[in-house]
Image (spheres, helix red, strand yellow):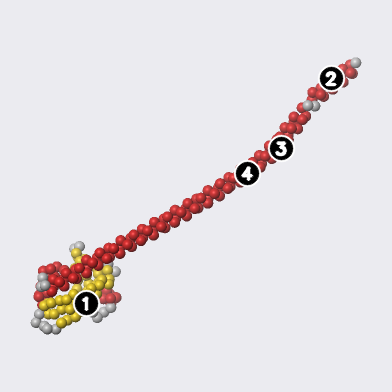
């Protein structure tokens, strides 16, 4: 009887313990599956992070390229604007310089020696009075700096008391003095432009 009771108790105890085994098994399976899933999740997450990193690097590279292209465009536009402004200023100066030459020969032809002396450095009234008539045929600025210029001119003139008509085709030097352009002189028809510039030390 006692043995039967013990046997019954053992069977009951075994019955109580047995159902707990599947719980640990399922928990173990769950942990394994979770670990595998986490590994795949970690791999996918790492892949996405790498893709984002590469995309960010590509974006930064494109942005830098765009900024560089913009900077180059802006530099080109600024250089074009500077060259255009420089060309416009050169043309403005040429007009002033040619006008000085025209006004000078007009004053000499009209015997307006005061004006002629103002337009040509170191020119005297005596020299002015020697000229009977002048004809200003052509002029072209062939060398120019902010403070100096060389013109190629063609003129014809007669002196008082002389029937000969003289012709001159050559270079003449102009310079900016006290804010005004004047004719310096140094009339020469026997040298090249390079030789003329070197001979009279005209600044580049």
Residue identified by numbered label 3: 32
Residue identified by numbered label 2: 9
Residue 73 percent coordinates (x, y): 41, 57
In the image, 204: left or right of 167? right
Residue under the image location 33 percent in, 60 percent down: 82
- The span from disc 2 to disc 3 (Cα, nearest Å) is 36 Å
In the image, 129: left or right of 60? left
* 1 vs 2, front mark: 1
- The span from disc 1 to disc 2 (Cα, nearest Å) is 140 Å
Residue 43 percent coordinates (x, y): 64, 44
Residue 191 percent coordinates (x, y): 26, 79
- The span from disc 4 to disc 3 (Cα, nearest Å) is 18 Å
In the image, 180: left or right of 87? left
* Picture layout, residue 203 above or below residue 54: below
In the image, 87: left or right of 44? left
- The span from disc 2 to disc 4 (Cα, nearest Å) is 54 Å
Residue 112 percent coordinates (x, y): 10, 70
* 2 vs 4, front mark: 4
* Picture layout, residue 47 above or below residue 11: below
Q: Which mark is residue 82?
A: none
**Contact, mark 2 vs mark 3 (Cβ under 8 Å):** no
Residue under the image location 18 percent in, 70 percent down: 102
Residue identified by numbered label 4: 44
Quadrant showing the C terminus:
bottom left
Whether residue 180 is visible here, answered yes or no, is yes
Residue identified by numbered label 1: 154
Label 2, residues with CA under 10 Å away: few <14, some 14-19, many ≥20: few
* 4 vs 3, front mark: 4
């Amino acid at each position: 009887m006692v043995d039967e009771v013990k046997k019954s108790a053992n069977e009951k105890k075994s019955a109580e313990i047995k159902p707990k085994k599947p719980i640990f098994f399922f928990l173990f399976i769950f942990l394994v599956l979770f670990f595998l899933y986490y590994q795949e999740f970690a791999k996918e997450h790492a892949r996405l992070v790498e893709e984002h990193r590469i995309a960010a690097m590509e974006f930064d590279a494109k942005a830098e390229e765009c900024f560089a292209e913009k900077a180059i465009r802006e530099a080109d536009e600024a250089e074009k604007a500077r060259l255009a402004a420089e060309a416009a200023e050169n043309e403005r100066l040429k007009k002033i310089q040619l006008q000085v030459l025209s006004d000078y020969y007009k004053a000499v032809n009209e015997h307006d020696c005061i004006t002629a002396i103002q337009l040509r450095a170191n020119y005297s009234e005596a020299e002015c009075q020697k000229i009977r008539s002048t004809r200003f045929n052509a002029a072209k600025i062939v060398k120019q700096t902010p403070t100096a210029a060389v013109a190629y001119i063609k003129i014809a003139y007669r002196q008082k008391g002389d029937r000969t008509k003289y012709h001159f085709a050559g270079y003449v030097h102009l310079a900016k003095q006290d804010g005004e352009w004047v004719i310096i002189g140094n009339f020469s028809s026997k040298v090249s432009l390079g030789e003329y510039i070197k001979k009279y030390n005209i600044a580049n």
